[in-house]
Image: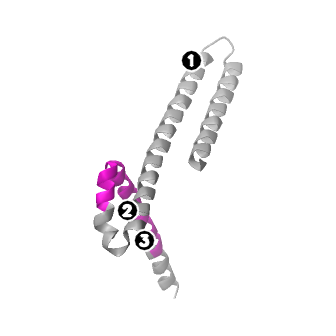
Amino acid sequence: MKKLIKLLFIVIVVSVIAAAVASVISKKKLSTMSDEEIREYLASKIGPKVGDDQLASIQDAVIAGVRKGAVVQESVEDYASDAQDTVSDAAADVAGDDPQDEAAAAAGDAAAAVVDAAEAIIDEAKG
């Protein structure tokens, strides 16, 4: 019985991982398409199954979601770059007269930058 439960658990875990990978691949595929290409793709996949009004609302929601994801990703990259610059500046400052005080100040600045970046990402994702 234990082997059956373990096998079932492994199958569920593998299925969840496969679904996550498929979702990421699908999002990347859609993010490289233009709005019109996304509309055509969705129409070919689900057009016969839903009405025209539903298809239009689904297309609008998918396009909005894809574009929002691209904006959030760019913001994350910007914040990561800013945090890296802050850490680099702090490391350069550490080479000053009192290494312990400078290191403590640099670590505090870097931590504050990371917290600010995380808060901005969360706010942008909510909005």
Q: x, y percentage for residue 53?
A: 41, 66
Position of residue 13 relative to residue 36, above or below, is below
Q: Depth-wise, is mark 3 or mark 1 nearer the camera?
A: 3
Q: Earlier in the sequence, mark 1 or mark 2?
A: 2
Position of residue 46 relative to residue 93, above or below, is below
The label shown at residue 22 is: 2
Q: x, y percentage for residue 6?
A: 49, 79
Residue under label 1, please give it. 92
Position of residue 23 relative to residue 85, above or below, is below
Residue under label 3, please give it. 15
Do tag 1 and tag 2 residues touch (Cβ < 8 Å)?
no
Instruction: Give the residues drawn in magenta, as a range.
Output: 12-41
Q: Is residue 65 left or right of residue 97?
A: left
Q: Does residue 19 belong to the magenta stretch?
A: yes
Q: Which residue occupies the foreground of this view, 48 or 13?
A: 48
Residues under labels 1 and 2: Cα distance?
43 Å
Query: Given the image, on which type of amino acid does mark 3 rest?
Result: Ser
Secondary structure of residue under mark 2: helix
Q: Quadrant of residue 93?
A: top right
Residue farthest to the right? 101
Query: Given the image, on which type of amino acid does mark 1 rest?
Result: Ala
Query: Given the image, on which type of amino acid does mark 2 rest?
Result: Ala
Residues under labels 2 and 3: Cα distance?
10 Å
Colour convention of the picture: one colour
Q: Which residue occupies the foreground of this view, 59 or 12?
A: 59
